[in-house]
Amino acid sequence: MNKKKLNIATKIALTYLVFVGLLAFFRSGMSGVFSIYYSASGIEEHNISFIKSFQNIGILMGLIPAGILADKIGRLKVLTLSSWIMAISFGIILTSSTLVSFSIAEWLYGIGLALNSGILLAYVSDLQEEKGVVISNQTMGRRTTVLNAATLLGGNIGTSLFNVNIDFPLYFSIIGLSIYPFIIFFWLKISGFKDNKSEILSIEKTSEKKLKKILALSNLRNFKINRPLLNISIANLIFEAAIQFVLIYWSIYYVQQLGFNLTLVFTLMMSAVILGSELYVKIINYLENSTVLLSSILVMGISLVGIGMIDYKMFSLILFILFEIGTGIFTSSVHAEQNKALISQNNKSKVLSLIDFTTEISVIFVLMINNYFIESLGVQKMFIASGMLLGLVLLVVLKNQSIKERIS
């Protein structure tokens, strides 16, 4: 890659990382305290999973329209809408006190997340295609580092504010998400980039009838997902379903049941994820991506089963940190694979939305199961169930690797 293209690739990567990092920073004010906030508001533990399922229902309802809308009016316009909808949802939580009102707020928040899902990746992928450059695996690995560093910073602000007043983290996120679109506008001015949308919708002098016909063909006959993207998406789908319990109940278990400090556990958790993403950047130069995936899955699965079986609180915390390191490695690897596969994929926003749509169906199903099993098994034993479900991810990666070896 010549120097000019290298500079363009660097600018594109920086744009991606800035947008990802700032959005994560502003919306993470509640990331460390959501479950405890609901518990402090009188919601029973098993019903927290029920409330969270409405977030995924909102995501499910918004994913397909998000992709179509992004391709039609522009990716960054949809990202702006996403930010404002999430701000409104936090405002509803601020004024809520019942199971129903919290569920409505989570549903709206899910729609906001859906409008954000895959939009930045599609935007950056099109920029790479337009400029004739490719962002490296190391840069995509840095994406996870930036995302989690921003979440760590914003989440620590949130946990600190929570200790002063449980509503203060909501104010932080509402203000930040409201001004995020103005930061996007300013960045585009100084970077020289423009918003983008699907090529099929930017063809000049296309009649409305012809446009509808093209879109119909695109959606039905020619809508195909390439094999590499499909494979990595299946593995990520099972992973997302497997860790839902951990994402929701880690604070209930480590803070309320084991008595650890909230800010301490949150900081250790996010630092471990960042460490994992940085380890990925280092080890990907020496190992195949499939090997990295397998190793991270094993670390995560063994850690979760250990948490569910061992009662010693300090050892449990160490296993939780190991799980988060594995999560950082796994997510970095997945995003690197997705970036490679998306370069040759048509209708990027629609494809990403369809993949996320399928993932959310699985997540909603798992959350509903969690709601019933937590009552009978208890929080600690549910870590074992999550670890066992990660075994399916291991099988998918092993199968895909076997297919690649036969083809080569």
Image (spheres, rainbow, N blue to C red):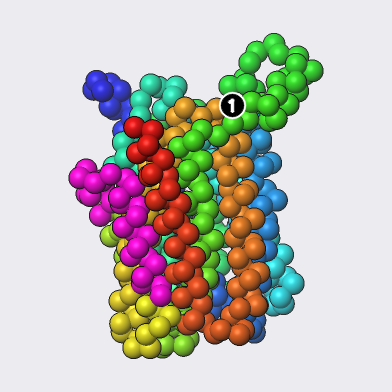
User: Which residue matches tag 1?
Assistant: 198
Which secondary structure dominates the residues rendered in magenta? helix
Of residue 244 and residue 8, the one placed in the foreground of this image is 244
Give the residue at the far right of this rendering.
209
**Residue visible at 64% across and 62% down in the picture:** 364
Q: Would residue 68 be found to the left or right of residue 166 on screen? A: right
| Quarter of the rendering containing residue 96 | bottom right
Quick check: 50 left or right of 189? right
**Residue situated furthest front in the rendering:** 406
In the picture, measured across the screen, residue 233 lies left or right of residue 156, that is: right
Residue 40: in magenta span: no
Please provide percent x and percent y for residue 227: 49, 35
Q: Magenta residues?
A: 279-305
Residue 30, can we see it?
A: no
**Rendered residue at 24%/46% (across/down):** 287
At x 35% / y 81%, what residue is drawn? 316
> Would residue 293 be visible to someone looking at this image?
yes
- Residue 297: in magenta span: yes
Name the image quarter holding the N terminus. Answer: top left
Residue 401 quadrant: top left
Q: Where does the image place residue 163, in percent across and percent down from the top left?
A: 46, 80
Going by the numbered disc 1, the residue's amino acid type is Ser
Residue 81 screen position, x and y as percent: 62, 45
